Image (cartoon, rainbow, N blue to C red):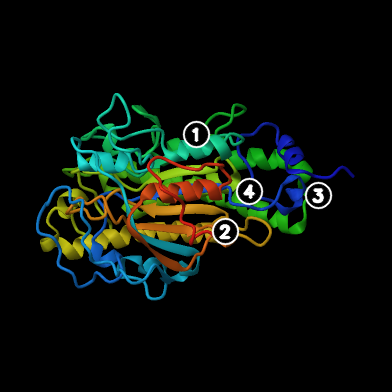
Amino acid sequence: MTPLTRRRFLRGLGGSALALPWLESTAIASGPKRLRRMAQFYVPIGVVRRGFFPGEADHVIPEGNLGNVMASLGTQDPVYRVRPLTALTPTMQPLDPHKAKITLITGMDRTFQQGTDVHAQCASCYLSSAKPYTIEGTAWPLDRTLDHLVADGIGQATPFPTLEFSCNSHQDNKESIYFDNISWYGTGHLAPSIRDPRTMYRRLFSTSESDRFRDITSLVLEDARTFQKQLALSDRHKLSEYFDAIRALEVQMDRLEAMKAELTTVALDEPAEAYLPRGEYIRLMGDLMVVALQSGLTHVATFMVGPERWDTPFLYEGLFEKPRSHHQMSHDQTKVIDDLLKIDLFHMEQFAYLVARMDAIPDGEGTTLLDNTLFTYGSGLGDGSTHQYNDLPIIVAGGGAHVATGHHFNMPEGTPLANLWLTQAQLLGLPWDHFADSRGVLSDWVS
């Protein structure tokens, strides 16, 4: 019998755009197991430091908007550089079941280029980390971002070299594109993110052989039936679970669209889209990202959980009775500190949900999707009130045996964020010796 390779299996699917998860029966054509995916989970407005950073729970919150504070608050313990993650801070608590597979990295900085808005620059330049005043024709230190550079190396064989997800459901266009995007093809050339779950679903799973509303899973199952007998029993179960997950997403899409239709009839001050259940919306977008990574539709994704400095409020279901503006709240931390901590925890819960989803998906050779992905939680601000660009909140989930997970790395003062991006690129097999303003790699973190 001719060996069943992954290439031969996919060729037999008749050109359907729906890719398949890793199947051990088709692994004969694969090389050694290594990291091959990167995903970024971006949180706007920074965090409340006392809730996120170890050792800062009792420190005074800065009064009001202090502008761009470039100096450190000086609250990180200078004695240690690496220590195990034991008790997590209140904001990090949702990650407690997964702390053996995460890395907390503190002390990394970005340099602010004077003359432009702090929020726009912290979002748009987060993944470029270009040296200030080195990019011609722009007031921003904004260059081709990490996700596209990495995709040049690991994403060219996938249907989508990169995918850009946004959870900004507003349509008011209050701010410029620099406040609402972290992914850029190059200076001044936006990689537009998709905000609507159904639009993203159709982009991922529509086919030229069927109309846009056809049941995609049935189409793929029909083409794949010929190969069922050649798959191992475990792979047949895995394939069945995968298609069940796709169908579950279709049900979620229908439910979400029906909810939108109902909400448009309600007399509210905010647009109906702003009143969709926030957590369900974020998790649905996240599920789409996970399926895209799982199936091989892409190896590189960015996920922006909300826009920077967007004063149009969101209703955070289960947290507040009325819509709230995250940005406006961040400028008055002394009065609404408990509410801000709730938003930080809410965002961490969404990240933890996706970490759990990825860690529950087998990815061959005893590993999970999370093990073979570098999934980074981060923000372009270290604190939303002071607008500081130093000591950014960074957590990396995944990496498997390639990195020293389960630890807190407290980097020396002045360590560029670009050092982390360079390290991740090298872990993904790219032969880089520098990136943007990097000065080296995080050698202690790499196993």
Q: Residue at x 40, y 40 (%)?
A: 436
- Give the alpha-carbon distance from disc 1 to disc 4, as whole Å: 18 Å
Q: Name the element at disc 1.
A: helix
Q: Amino acid at mark 2?
A: His
186 vs 252: above or below: above
Marks 3, 2: nearer the viewer: 2
N-terminal of the two: label 2 or label 1?
Answer: 1
232 vs 138: above or below: below
Give me the disc on residue 203: 1
N-terminal of the two: label 4 or label 2?
Answer: 4
- Give the alpha-carbon distance from disc 2 to disc 1, as whole Å: 33 Å
Q: Residue furthest right?
A: 1
Give me the disc on residue 243: none
For the N terminus, the image quarter is top right
Give me the disc on residue 21: 4
Marks 3, 4: nearer the viewer: 4
Residue behind mark 3: 229
For the C terminus, the image quarter is bottom right
Residue contact at pointers 1 and 4, CB within 8 angstroms:
no
- Give the alpha-carbon distance from disc 1 to disc 3, as whole Å: 31 Å
Question: Residue 293: horizontal and vertical position, in percent?
Answer: 54, 46
Between 222 and 298, the residue placed more toward the observer is 298
- Give the alpha-carbon distance from disc 3 to disc 2, as whole Å: 36 Å
Question: Residue 343: horizontal and vertical position, in percent?
Answer: 26, 58
Marks 2, 1: nearer the viewer: 2
Q: Residue at x 33, y 27 (%)?
A: 188
Residue contact at pointers 3 and 4, CB within 8 angstroms:
no
